[in-house]
């Protein structure tokens, strides 16, 4: 199973664009939350999302770009493969 972190940057967003993006990405299997152990989980900042699944890097780029462009064009999309995750100073669940 692959794990990715993605960041989406809208160039002139409204107050609700990132919430709409989160809904669109959540329907595609993304989350703003990661669970580190049974007791502690963390939330990413508004523009960052996590995905674990079978998609490869090119498929990820397509999924995220498609979702982002449903909300607002233009946008910038970055995707990072993430193996080990060690969050620091994220909001604790």
Image (cartoon, grey):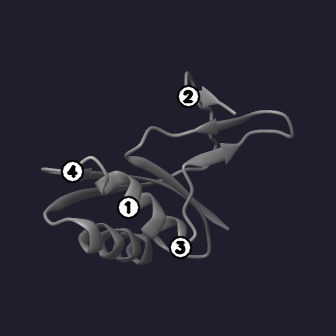
Mark 1 and mark 3: Cα distance apart in space: 11 Å
Mark 4 and mark 3: Cα distance apart in space: 21 Å
Q: Are marks 4 and 3 in contact (CB under 8 Å)?
A: no
Q: Tell which residue pokes out farthest to the front in this image.
A: 15
Q: Residue 20 — which label?
A: 1
Whole-percent x and y of residue 64? 37, 68
- Which quadrant is the C terminus positioned in? top right
Q: Dot 3: within a 10 Å radius of its alpha carbon, few (fewer than 14), some, or many (20 or more) residues?
A: few
Q: Residue 14 — which label?
A: 4
Of the two numbered discs 4 and 3 in the rendering, the one whose residue sits closer to the viewer? 4
- Say which residue label 3 marks: 27
Identify the mark nearer the N-term, 1 or 3: 1
The residue drawn where x is 47% and y is 64% is: 23
Q: How many marks?
A: 4
Helix, strand or loop for disc 3: loop
Q: Residue 90 — which label?
A: 2
| Front in this rendered view, residue 71 or 84 | 71
């Amino acid at each position: 199973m692959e794990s990715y972190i993605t960041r989406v940057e809208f160039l002139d967003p409204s107050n609700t664009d990132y919430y709409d993006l989160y809904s669109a990405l959540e329907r595609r299997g993304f989350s703003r939350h990661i669970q580190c152990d049974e007791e502690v989980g963390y939330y990413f900042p508004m523009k960052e999302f996590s995905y674990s699944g079978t998609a490869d890097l090119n498929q990820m780029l397509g999924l995220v770009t498609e979702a982002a462009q449903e909300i607002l064009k233009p946008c910038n999309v970055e995707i990072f493969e993430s193996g080990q995750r060690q969050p620091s100073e994220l909001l604790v669940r």
